[in-house]
Image (tube, grey):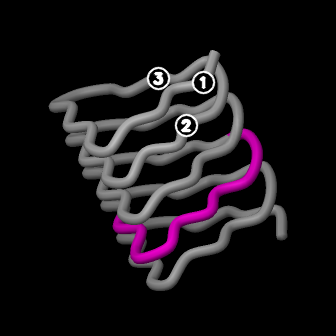
Amino acid sequence: MEIKGSHVSVGGVLEVDGSAEIDEISVGGTIAIKGSIRGKKVSVGGRLRVDENASIEDRVEVGGELKTGGELKAGIVKVGGTLWADA
């Protein structure tokens, strides 16, 4: 399953069983994506996990841990804790 949109705001947990193409994502807790993610801006209070590639045009801000199973492309990356990327 794939999710597409312009803006997603979630207070707790966002789980996607596939890929996501969303311009702006703001999540207070955790984002878990089983595929890849494409967008402009991602802001997560806790943890961002992407099983494949992450391609963010503008910025990624994560309070805790950012982990990708593939390539991470972003203009600006800010991580408060740990950053894990395959490439």
First of labels 1, 3 by sequence position: 1
Helix, strand, or loop for circle 1?
A: strand
Looking at the picture, tell me which residue is in the foreground, 30 or 76. Answer: 76
Residue 73 image point, x, y percent: 65, 73
Give the residue at mark 1.
Answer: 2
Which amino acid, mark 1?
A: Glu
Helix, strand, or loop for circle 3?
A: strand
Classify the position of the C terminus by image quarter. bottom right
The structure residue drawn at horizontal position 31% and vertical position 61%, both measured from the top left corner, is 63
Which amino acid, mark 3?
A: Glu
Looking at the picture, tell me which residue is in the foreground, 37 or 11. Answer: 37
CA separation in Å, label 1 and label 3: 11 Å
Which amino acid, mark 2?
A: Ala
Q: Are marks 1 and 2 in contact (CB under 8 Å)?
A: yes
Give the residue at mark 3.
Answer: 15
Q: Which mark is residue 20?
A: 2
- Within 10 Å of the Cα at label 1, are there few (<14), some (14-19), or many (20+) other Cα atoms? few
CA separation in Å, label 1 and label 2: 6 Å
Which of pointers 1 and 3 indicates the residue nearer the eye? 1
CA separation in Å, label 2 and label 3: 10 Å
Residue 49 image point, x, y percent: 57, 43
Looking at the picture, tell me which residue is in the foreground, 75 or 62. Answer: 75
- Within 10 Å of the Cα at label 2, are there few (<14), some (14-19), or many (20+) other Cα atoms? many
Looking at the picture, tell me which residue is in the foreground, 3 or 87. Answer: 3
First of labels 2, 3 by sequence position: 3
What is the magenta range?
51-61
Side (left or right) of 25 relative to 34: left
Residue 22 image point, x, y percent: 43, 45
